[in-house]
Image (cartoon, grey):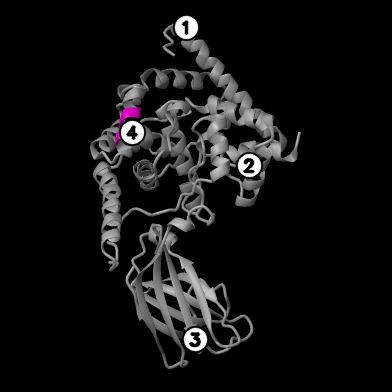
């Protein structure tokens, strides 16, 4: 009995960290007992969904769901045809990158039929990056304020449906103590944190921030601002705005 | 019924929107009910169901008919999609056991829907025959998809005994189910 064998339950429930999951999958490839246990869990649980009490789906759900799915398909086609990228209308759907873990997926699929965690988090860059292309959806230059003569640019880049905010700034003053530069996206006047950075010796700083969480929360930001904060973990902006610009979500 | 699903699935792979709609119509309520039982949140449930159908529509060749029933596969995908969404929204709510909004449960039943008729009746009966603590193990493990540690915490039992408890509860459930099926004597598979 290997220590890895104790992880079967957490693997079945997709509760392992990425590292633990990889380690377990390596172990699984050679452990008959774990393969057997996973298969058994699958068999023993296959009827369980039918215990669920019947619930009427949300009103209008079918139209929304199918509409969103087909709309995305349409947008993909449009994007392929026109090089000029238009900002997407706000859609309820939140894209995720799902990546099938090549070897592990093939292994599991062959072992225990069609069960596999198809929902890999997006931090497995190896398998799909070659086939995807980054596209700039929106890019604005940031205006400096009286505080310092800084300059910067913010861009929203889309890769395979996931939007990332990229911010670069220069001519930044050196920080002192716990200070850090903080990026905010503002919806009306409500700020949402969008990354933290400290400048290098040359006064340059940059941030890449995934927008999927904000999109998921349906935040419609209209402004980006960079502040100099007294500490890196402020939840609300306290410091002065250094750079700002309007930017569409 | 599985052949119909497989045909639809294959047509969907070829971009047939009507097949997508047919598949959606057939499974909407089952998936919604199942995912709602896991997430206890209607909005999240809709997102999960949409994500599942988006995968079916855009990802080619995910389902392999030689590996088992389409419905089992679909439910498995839905479960893992739900787990993923629950992880991302873990701040939104602690999904408690007893919490259940009665107004959300309708008076029709999954039994009226197509082929999962018999499945539904018998598994529910079998579940009722289990002891309460075994039912709880199954809910925490399968529907809440908690980690071993969290299950141990919730049940107040040592971590090392969680796996054994889960297997025992599941096996009891399966036995009860078999007994019910034998009693009916109409096993089709």
Viewer-nearest of discs 3 and 1: 3
Task: Find the distance from the CA under tag 3 to the CA under tag 1.
Answer: 77 Å
Q: Which residues are magenta?
A: B6-11
Q: Nearer the viewer, residue B12 or B32?
A: B12
Q: Are dots 4 and 3 on a single chain?
A: no
* N-term-proximal mark, 2 vs 3: 2
Q: Chain of mark 3?
A: A
Dominant SS of magenta comes to: helix
Viewer-nearest of discs 4 and 2: 4
Q: Which picture quadrant has residue A33?
A: top right
Q: Nearer the viewer, residue A199 or B110?
A: A199
Crowding around mark 3 (Cα neighbors within 10 Å: few <14, some 14 to 19, many 20+) is some
Image spot of residue B163 (x, y percent): 66, 32
Q: Which residue is mark 2?
A: A25
Residue A118 higher or lower than B69, as above or below: below
Residue A65 higher or lower than A242, as above or below: above
Viewer-nearest of discs 4 and 3: 4
Name the image quarter holding the N terminus of chain A: top right
- Tell me the number on the disc at residue B10: 4
Q: Nearer the viewer, residue A185 or A2?
A: A2
Which residue appears at 36% of the width and 45% of the height?
Answer: B58
Which residue appears at 30% of the width and 28% of the height?
Answer: B107
- Tell me the number on the disc at residue A170: 3
Tag 4 secondary structure: helix
Crowding around mark 1 (Cα neighbors within 10 Å: few <14, some 14 to 19, many 20+) is few
Q: Chain of mark 1?
A: B
Name the image quarter holding the C terminus of chain A: bottom left
Crowding around mark 4 (Cα neighbors within 10 Å: few <14, some 14 to 19, many 20+) is some
Q: Are dots 1 and 2 on a single chain?
A: no
Image spot of residue B177 (x, y percent): 50, 16
| Residue B106 in view | no
């Amino acid at each position: 009995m290997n220590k890895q064998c104790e992880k079967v339950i957490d693997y079945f429930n997709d509760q392992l960290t990425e590292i633990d999951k990889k380690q377990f999958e390596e172990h699984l490839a050679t452990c008959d007992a774990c393969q057997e246990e996973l298969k058994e869990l699958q068999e023993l649980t296959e009827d369980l969904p039918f215990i669920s009490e019947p619930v009427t789906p949300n009103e209008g759900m079918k139209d929304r769901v199918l509409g969103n799915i087909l709309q995305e398909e349409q947008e993909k086609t449009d994007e392929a045809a026109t090089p000029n990228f238009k900002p997407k209308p706000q859609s309820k759907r939140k894209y995720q990158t799902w990546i099938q873990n090549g070897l592990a997926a093939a292994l599991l699929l062959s072992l225990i039929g069609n069960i596999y965690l198809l929902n890999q988090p997006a931090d497995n860059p190896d398998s799909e990056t070659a086939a995807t292309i980054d596209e700039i959806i929106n890019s604005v230059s940031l205006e400096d304020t009286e505080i310092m003569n800084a300059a910067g640019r913010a861009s929203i880049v889309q890769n395979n449906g996931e939007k990332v905010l990229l911010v670069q700034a220069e001519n930044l003053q050196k920080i002192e103590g716990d200070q850090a530069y903080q990026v905010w996206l503002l919806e009306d006047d409500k700020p949402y944190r969008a990354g933290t950075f400290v400048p290098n010796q040359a006064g340059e700083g940059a941030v890449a921030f995934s927008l999927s969480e904000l999109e998921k929360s349906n935040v419609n930001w209209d402004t980006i601002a960079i502040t100099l904060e007294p500490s890196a973990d402020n939840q609300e902006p306290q410091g002065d705005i250094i750079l700002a610009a309007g930017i569409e979500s | 019924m599985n052949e119909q699903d497989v045909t639809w699935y294959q047509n969907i792979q070829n971009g047939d929107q009507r097949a997508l709609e047919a598949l959606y119509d057939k499974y909407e309520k089952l998936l919604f009910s199942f995912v709602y039982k896991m997430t206890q949140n209607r909005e999240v449930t809709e997102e999960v169901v949409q994500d599942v159908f988006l995968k079916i529509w855009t990802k080619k060749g995910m389902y392999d008919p030689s590996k088992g029933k389409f419905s089992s596969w679909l439910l498995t995908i839905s479960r893992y999609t739900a787990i993923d969404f629950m992880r991302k929204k873990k701040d939104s709510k602690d999904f408690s056991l007893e919490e259940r909004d009665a107004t959300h449960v309708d008076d029709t039943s999954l039994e009226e829907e197509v082929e999962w008729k018999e499945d539904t009746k018998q598994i529910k009966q079998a579940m009722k025959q289990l002891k309460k603590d075994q039912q709880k193990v199954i809910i925490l493990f399968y529907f809440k998809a908690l980690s071993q540690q969290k299950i141990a915490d919730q049940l107040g039992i040592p971590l090392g005994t969680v796996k054994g408890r889960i297997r025992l509860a599941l096996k009891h459930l399966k036995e009860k189910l078999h007994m019910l099926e034998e009693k009916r004597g109409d096993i089709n598979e």
